Amino acid sequence: MKKSHVLIMILCCLIPVAAMTAIFLFKVPANSVLLYGLILLCPLSHLLMMKFMGHDHSESKITPEASQNCHEQPAEVRLSVK
């Protein structure tokens, strides 16, 4: 099993435990825990997805010349409309 997968499994188990601890031990209202949990769900899942799926903008192989003409197709691929 990959190390990153184990980390995600541990986080998915500890987050609900922390929420239940906050509700029962510290007497935090459940509405607040659910509200803040839902607010944090989207950005945290996005960050985890970007980290563990290997998405990295720093290793882009597009040169400035290629990025200027990225929407232009070669002449043999262009379709003529009549």
Image: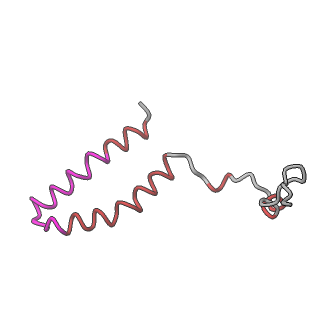
Scheme of image coloration: secondary structure
Magenta residue span: 11-31
- Above or below residue 58? Residue 10 is above
Which residue lies at the image location 9% right of the left edge and 65% below the top edge?
27
Q: Is 29 inside the magenta-drawn segment?
A: yes
Q: Position of residue 36 (x, y in %)?
A: 27, 67
- Above or below residue 7? Residue 39 is below
> Residue 26 lies in what quarter of the image?
bottom left
Which residue lies at the image location 80% right of the left edge and 57% below the top edge?
63
Nearer the observer, 58 or 45: 45
Residue at the outermost front position = 82
Nearer the observer, 33 or 14: 33
Which residue lies at the image location 84% right of the left edge and 60% below the top edge?
81
Residue at the outermost right position = 75
Q: Quadrant of the N terminus?
A: top left
Q: Is 9 inside the magenta-drawn segment?
A: no
Horizontal side of 62 relative to 24 (left or right) equals right
The majority secondary structure of the magenta stretch comes to helix
Q: Position of residue 15 (x, y in %)?
A: 26, 52
Which residue lies at the image location 20% right of the left edge and 51% below the top edge?
17
Q: Position of residue 59 (x, y in %)?
A: 67, 51
Q: Quadrant of the C terminus?
A: bottom right
Q: Position of residue 76 (x, y in %)?
A: 89, 49
Horizontal side of 75 relative to 36 (left or right) equals right
Horizontal side of 10 relative to 80 (left or right) equals left
Horizontal side of 18 relative to 50 (left or right) equals left
Residue at the outermost top position = 1
* Total numbered circles: 0
Nearer the observer, 80 or 46: 80
